[in-house]
Amino acid sequence: MSQSGLNQPVLRWKPNALFSEKDLKSATTSAHFATLIEALGIIDRSKEKNVVLVTRTPVGWTTYEYIGSSACKVDFRELRLGGLPLGGNPLLPETYIVDGKGRFSRIVFDGHQYRLDETPRPIQEPSGSWVVEAVVPVEEINHSKNVTWLPKITLRPTLDELLAALSWVDQNMPDGKVKAGGSKHSSSQVAVSADVYIEPERMKLIRTVNEDPDVYRSDLSERRENLVRGGSGNTIKEMNRFLWEHGKSFPALGGFDGQTLGGVFPTGTHGSVFTRGPLAETIVSIDLALSSGQLVRIEPHDGITDPKALASTLSNTRLIQDDDNFHAALINMGTMGVVHSYMLEVTPAFHMNEIRTPSTIPELKEKLRDGKIYSLAGAPGMPVDLEKIPPRISDGRDGGFKDQPIRAYHLEFLINPHTDKVIVTSRHPTTITAAADAELGFDPPGRDLIRTIHRGARFGRPVLPTWLQENFRGLLSWGIDQLIKIAPSATPKLIDSAMDTLIDAAYTDRSFNVFNVGDGTNQIPTLSGTIFVPVAADAYLAAVDIIRATASQFAKSRNRYQTGPTSMRFVRGTKAMMGCVDDVCAFEILFTGGTTWALEMVEAYEAALREGLGHEAVRVHWGQLVGEGVGRREGYSEYARWREVRDELDPKGVFVNEWLERIL
């Protein structure tokens, strides 16, 4: 027997309708045994009334003991199974529970759901082999709480188990749909599956290219220093820490670091660094697991992998070096397979300074019209080089926004669609001393009020609003929703007041902390939809008027308001077939989590923009609120070729759920 490092499963018990459900407390640490018969020996030694769970692992068996009830003995029929391990076979579980009355039960699957059935005590070892880590499914819910789903099968493979898991699904559930999840931060149904759902938590891997098998071209020279592999289940936060500790950074990021790589890249997530496209452009190589259990590596025609070296070292990996396949796979909404890992090309580490200043809609339109956004955003060059050149700060009379850099590295605008209020946010590389960096951390300041004050104004966002969001976000969110319900017409002023708290002369930190809008803000339940509009011919400025007019119409005719501001961010055109090929302004339309009409309002904005600007000019973010009943192919000139690649990689449509079938 040995101690096991596995986390103890949560065992929930609800004895009857008069008692609330509770978690049974652990009685001992888990223990590992080589055989089932040895594992069952712990039952004979357990205290009377205690509950014991015995489950198979890849290398043996593990037991967990729980403290029973002194009031009444725990009956196995009163236990909740959601989240319990299935012992390596989702269809023939190898998990047993002995209840407080000493009765043996086993988790069984009847083709539709799992249950506990009483069973005789096993007297021999099972003959079946371990397949994959799986758990009893639970109802899944996204961060915005607007999408729920209950899978039939939930798998938790490691990257080493992923291919075998997909092969098992292919053989045992040939008609099933498969979706791999991320952080559940999407407001859309892009990752929903009623059949097989793959959780990402164990699909993690971070290493430099020099720690990878040596299958890469010998002429990569300095590029090798910036190549890092990340597993699809790794979060941006985990990557940020690894990169910084190795002297590297992402060149651009969105505002949330809890997303997984396998979720953030395939949906087209972006930042607002106008010299760069969506975050997926950081990818130089994709290792993709197909429904058959085969691994393919997809790269552009001049990819980093040496075909001969790969064939001799990783013979089970099929290499596709083709521009169409690569550009189709960059943004694919998880419709081609399950991402194993990515090779990413990052940049040397850098710091940034953020400035947030007030403005108005008339000023915004005046200073951006006739293509002037190109003179105010998108500073050319590598961030580490821009650090050394202090930007010119506008006095407000030279065409720029007062107190903001001219040609900022990152530039975005936050507008209130119901008023003229605007907040201008710039982020630009800057230098700080090694001593100052030593005081910084891997999280934005905020939760710890004393630490935030100690760091000083330059190294933190406004102290009190940030601290309140970090520590009282649930109460704040509930309070705002209640105010909006009681007095809807107060919404515009509430948004203005919230935007005023963002104004800040300077916030300097490590680049990833500055990109991050903050843990408190990110954890507040919100709904959002993003609509992309071309920058060319100032179409995005016309979109500002269309959005404001539509918001006004909603308020006047229905007394309903957009309950948050709208962010305007700028993204360079991309070669990704299901991204925006031209330079665009991304309008991220924000709502509080309790806004029941959010999707309806996003649909109204999209319809008005399509009518005013043309159907081909309007595109959407696949991971956010997306209306249905609209032909989406018109905005993607290479859709037909993208579909061909998708169908070649997933001919049976295993990774296309019902929602994706409707909108694609």
Image (cartoon, helix red, strand yellow):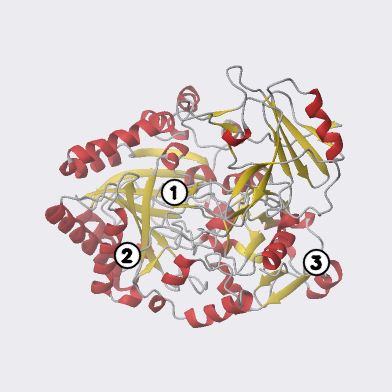
Along the line of sight, the residue nearer the viewer: 420 or 256: 256
Q: Are marks 1 and 2 in contact (CB under 8 Å)?
A: no
Which dot, 2 or 3, sits closer to the camera?
Answer: 3
Task: Write down the residue under mark 1.
Answer: 427
Judged from this view, the residue extending furthest toward the top is 70
Name which of mark 3 and mark 1 comes first in the sequence: 3
Q: Secondary structure at mark 1?
A: strand
Which residue sits at x=52%, y=73%? 575
Q: Is residue 31 left or right of residue 546?
A: right
- Residue type at mark 2? Lys
Question: Disc 2 versus disc 3: distance between alpha carbons?
Answer: 46 Å
* Secondary element at tag 3: loop
The answer to whether residue 337 is seen in the rendering is yes
Discs 3/1, front: 3
The residue that label 3 is drawn on is 215
Can you tell which mark lies on residue 372? 2
Residue 491, percent across and down?
21, 43
- Describe residue 115's horizontal placement relative to residue 507 as left or right: right
